[in-house]
Amino acid sequence: MRTRQILCPTDFSDTASHALRYAIEMANFYHVGFRLLHVIDQPYGDANFQILAITPEELAQNMEEDAAEKMKQLLSGLKSELSIETVIRRGLPVEQILEEAEENDVGMIVMACHGRTGISHFLHTNVAEGVANGAKCPVLVVK
């Protein structure tokens, strides 16, 4: 592998945790750096059409703090001596994952696939598909 780093995006789902185990195993095997990324997406949907008692910036800050806590919990449950760099970004997941990979000379992205089928596949953005199509490095999608 020509990489110095593996990037593993997470949304804290069970599938993402499964992909994380693969990514760590690969990083240990190839003796490369490891970046764990979470992207805070812009909320959308009916549940978000409500009056907020806080500003959008405060909401974003709260979401970042929550993500940082989830990252800490996720890392504490891992049995790895690998040095893991954690990154939290804001924006559209596909764009942010691709930017993170490009800016940090990532050699491989290991991520989960949610495996939507039928009409759900057409109505929801498939982040793994978008990353695989846009990445300049190999992408391993784990089910």
Image (cartoon, grey):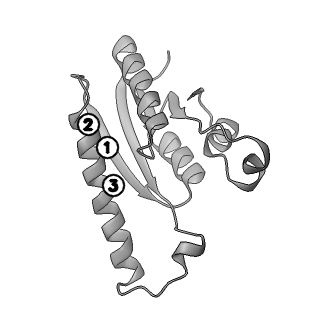
Kindly identify which numbered label has been placed on residue 67. Answer: 3
| Nearest the eye: 119 or 74 | 119
- Image x and y of residue 39, in percent: 46, 53
| Residue extending furthest toward the top | 29
- Image x and y of residue 88, in percent: 37, 53
Kind of residue indicated by mark 2:
Leu
In the visual, does 27 lie left or right of 143? Answer: left
Which comes before the other along the chain, label 1 or label 2? 2
Name the residue beneath numbered marker 1. Answer: 86
Name the residue beneath numbered marker 2. Answer: 75
Which comes before the other along the chain, label 1 or label 3? 3
Kindly identify which numbered label has been placed on residue 61. Answer: none
Judged from the image, the secondary structure of the residue bearing numbered disc 1 is: strand
- Image x and y of residue 99, in percent: 53, 48
> How far apart are labels 3 and 2 at the CA level?
12 Å
In this rendering, does residue 105 appear at all? no
Quadrant location of the C terminus?
A: top right
> How far apart are labels 1 and 2 at the CA level?
9 Å
Check whether the beta carbons of the residues at disc 1 and disc 2 lie within 8 A of each other.
yes
- Image x and y of residue 61, in percent: 32, 69
Kind of residue indicated by mark 3:
Ala
Residue 106 position (above or below residue 102): above
| Nearest the eye: 84 or 64 | 64
| Nearest the eye: 119 or 141 | 119
Judged from the image, the secondary structure of the residue bearing numbered disc 3 is: helix
In the visual, does 77 lie left or right of 106? Answer: left
> How far apart are labels 1 and 3 at the CA level?
11 Å
